[in-house]
Each structure stands twice: as structure tokens, then as C-alpha cells.
Image (spheres, rainbow, N blue to C red):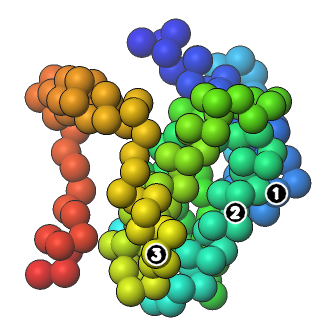
Amino acid sequence: MRWLARQLAAREAAALAALAGIDHVPRLLEFDGAVVRRSYLQGVPLYEAPPRSQVFFVRALKLVRQLHRAGIAHNDLAKEANWLVAAGETCAIVDFQLATRSATRTPRFRRRAYEDLRHLLKHKRTYQPLALTARQRRVLERPTLPTHLWRAVAKPVYRFVTRAVLGWQDRPGPLERRT
């Protein structure tokens, strides 16, 4: 699995290099071809410190748009652990191992950017459902074809491998945490 770890490290290093100068993402400090050294970001995962106001999601949307303008689609914003909540309802994004870079806004890049947005809106629906606009609700209702295929074909296999084979446990969902 070392080859996979190196591939993911290279993806993260490339994404962080492309995001140099953007606040609220880690800074690439060093990449030696195997190990990525990045700066530390202060904050706690979204599921440990749910945002108390809409300010977090306004800032999160601006940050996602900055990533996309820099040619980066994160591809893993569904995980609440990849969103950090810092002081003053500030947000940060971490874990760019699955990120993709694109110099142009190809149809593939636009699909991935759209899914980044959908995942952000899913979190907003969980923590600030009354703040969703009609347009945001429409985006949530329209996943892309690759998302439908992922859910139907790949996700069951992924869950089997990660849970049954590797023994990974999911953290409690928002409903379980509130009870």
C-alpha cells in the first residue's frame, strides 16, 4: 500500500502548493516524495463544535469558491472531520489527499466542484437547516450522475472494505450526538 500512500501524498502536496497564499488551508512546508509536512491549523472538527450561526457557512462558501478559483476540487468535503471550526465561527479545510487540480474548468472539474458545494450544503442542512435558500435546496436535490453511480455501485464495496476488512468505525452521526 506504500505506492498508494505516496500517490495520495503527492496529490496533497500538489493541491497545497496550488493553494499557497489562501488562508484557512494548511501551508505546504515540505514534500520529499513520500512525506508531506504542512502547517498546523487551529480548530476542532465540525462534528465536535457545530457552528452556532450562519456566519460559518458564509465563510465556508467563500473558502470553497477560493479553492475552485485556484483550480482545486477537494473531493472529500462530505467528511465533517475535514472541516475545522475555529474561533469566531471561522472555518478551515484540511486533508487534500483526494483533491484534484485542473488548470481549466473542464466538465470533470466542474462536476467535482459542484459536489464540493453539495457537501458543504449538506452540512449546512444538518446544522442550519432554516438558513438554506431555495436555490441551495435545489442543489441538494440534484446530485450528479457519478454520485448516483457511486452510491449504487462503489459505496457498498467501500463500506465493506473499510468496515469489515479494515475495521474502521464511523463516528456517531448528528442525531446520535444530540441524544
The amino acid type of the residue labelled 2 equals: Leu
Side of 56 relative to 105 (left or right): left
Mark 1, other Cα within 10 Å: few <14 / some 14–19 / many ≥20? some
Residue 63 is tagged as: 2
In the image, what residue occupies the spot 60% across and 85% down? 55
Crowding around mark 2 (Cα neighbors within 10 Å: few <14, some 14 to 19, many 20+) is: some
Q: Position of residue 42 (x, y in %)?
A: 62, 69
SS category of the residue bearing label 3? helix
Query: Disc 2 or disc 1, which is closer to the eye?
Result: 2
Find disc 3 in the rendering and name its residue: 134
Q: Does residue 21 appear left or right of residue 54 in this picture?
A: right
Res 51 visible: no
To which residue does mark 1 refer? 22
Q: Which quadrant of the view contains residue 63?
A: bottom right
Please state, as top left, top right, bottom left or bottom right, where the C terminus lies in the image.
Answer: bottom left
Q: Mark 2 and mark 1: span between their CA atoms?
A: 9 Å
Q: Is residue 41 above or below residue 68?
A: below
